[in-house]
Image: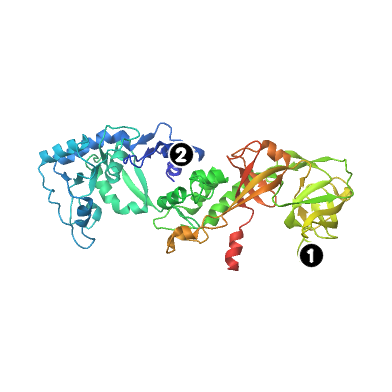
Amino acid sequence: MDFGAAERFGGTCNLRFDDTNPQKEDNEYVEAIKRDIHWLGYDWEDRLYYASDYFQQLYDLAIRLIKSGDAYVDEQTSEEIAAQKGTPTTPGIESPYRNRPVEENLDLFERMNKGEFEEGKYVLRAKIDMASDNMHFRDPIIYRIIHTPHWRTGNKWHVYPMYDFAHGQSDYFEGVTHSICTLEFVPHRPLYEYFVKFLADDSYCPRQIEFNRLNLTYTVMSKRKLLQLVKEGLVAGWDDPRMPTICGLRRRGFTPDSIKNFVRSIGYTKYEALNHIELLEHAVRDDLNRIATRVSAVVDPVKLVIDNYPADAKETFFMTDNPEDPESGQHAMPFGKELWIERGDFMENPPKKFFRLSPDKEVRLKGAYIIKCVGVDHDAEGNVETIHCTYDPETLTGRANADRKVKGTLHWVSVADAVPVEVRDYDRLFAVENPSAEEGDFRELLNPDSLKVHTNVMVEPWLAEHAKPGDHYQFVRLGYYTPDPDSKDSHLVFNRTIGLRDTWGKIAKKN
């Protein structure tokens, strides 16, 4: 939203990392976020900042507040401080150290920063109003002792500012006009404005503006819960294609445009909304339909033999890469006597409205001939092993019976040329629409069918030769897929981005 709003209104957007807690900061996360933003198509140019850039200025402001009597060092425990906060209907109790002399506060705060005291021994609190209706105004902690080395500043600092103290001041130092936050920061806004006014004047003052958090059905957006899934191995990392992270969506095959189009479609509100994941799925289907190359892949293969096709014959048909794009071109696809088709595209005893292949019925092979089933071979367990057909050579494009109509069209891959690959069919992470609203352990609501792995999928050779991570393909009649970074030359892996149709809608109606 931030970069998009700046782009829309001709402004600029800063990228700033709140690294005020060295116990939780990691350069790995910083680099991942930068990659994600660049992938989305945005560039912060020379406006990359960290809260740690302003540690000296923030420390100087804290000293100023102590000198003006607006801050004091408290040595109560965190439990004692919390107990004295009061409630929204009862005032808080002032700390016994609230009126500690200025010189003593200065001495203690400077010694805190020199590392003389253990963590938790002292904190610096702003002296505001313990009877305020806004709980955040009841002498909030603005500095605490942390001895963990900071990944950027090392051991230079032993006191670190709280987010509420660093946020507005960092905005001011950078010249930010609009600081965009989610709705949980609405009660923090008066505190933001209170601290900023120690620096700002009538000529310039940043504003905090809140909007709704992006919530999606069939997933959770809580970083705590997502981290739990990662740490417990319930997903394969932050970039697991089922995760609602930018890196996860990218690995699954979502495009930057699909994500941005989705965000624009739901808009920004001042109330918490639960957005239907179908809107995100529609956005990626729409974009991939426009750009994805069409290829043939057979997920559950069964052999089909064309009995009257010459044994030593081989043809090459040229398939349109994308019928939505007249300039997309074509690619070659070999054809022969033996083909792989989907096992589900054949039934020996079909119902009336089964328009695929069955005994004595005709279908068209996509981009090739019309065939007719004339026999079936079974294995020892009675499963269909080979389907025998005949073909009409005059039904190829440009020949006499090319326009002959049949109801079914099947995709296929030549047995002699097919390349085996692995396909991972991903689905929604949770089995219930709003897992955050359910009682109990959220992990028990995970969708057991969110990942199905197919290890013997047959694809056309052109795909195996050209596929690389970041490409987008439509496996005709199946869905949209992208090569996974796990792929090797000897073992290609494809992730399903989304099916061609919304099957979940049908499931919901049936239930």
N-terminal-most mark, 1 or 2: 2
Secondary structure of the residue carrying numbered label 1 = loop
Query: Could you classify mark 1 by the number of other residues whose Cα lies within 10 Å: few (under 14), some (14-19), or many (20 or more)?
Result: few
Question: Residue at coordinates 83% horizontally, 50% vertically from top-left?
Answer: 305
* Residue type at numbered disc 1: Asn
Question: Residue at coordinates 69% horizontally, 50% vertically from top-left?
Answer: 299
Q: Position of residue 8 (x, y in %)?
A: 46, 43
User: On screen, 86 above or below 367?
Assistant: below
Q: Is residue 101 left or right of residue 149?
A: left
Q: Position of residue 174 (x, y in %)?
A: 33, 36
Query: Could you classify mark 2 by the number of other residues whose Cα lies within 10 Å: few (under 14), some (14-19), or many (20 or more)?
Result: few
Q: Is residue 261 left or right of residue 213?
A: right
Q: Position of residue 91 (x, y in %)?
A: 18, 59
Q: Is residue 53 visible?
A: yes
User: On screen, 372 above or below 142?
Assistant: below
* Residue type at numbered disc 2: Ala
Question: Residue at coordinates 17% horizontally, 46% vertically from top-left?
Answer: 74
Residue identifier under label 1 = 349
Which of the pair 170/124 is nearer the observer?
Answer: 124
Residue identifier under label 2 = 32
Which of the pair 444/71 is nearer the observer?
Answer: 444
Which of the pair 20/406 is nearer the observer?
Answer: 20
Quarter location, residue 135: bottom left
Q: Position of residue 286 (x, y in %)?
A: 60, 50
Secondary structure of the residue carrying numbered label 2 = helix
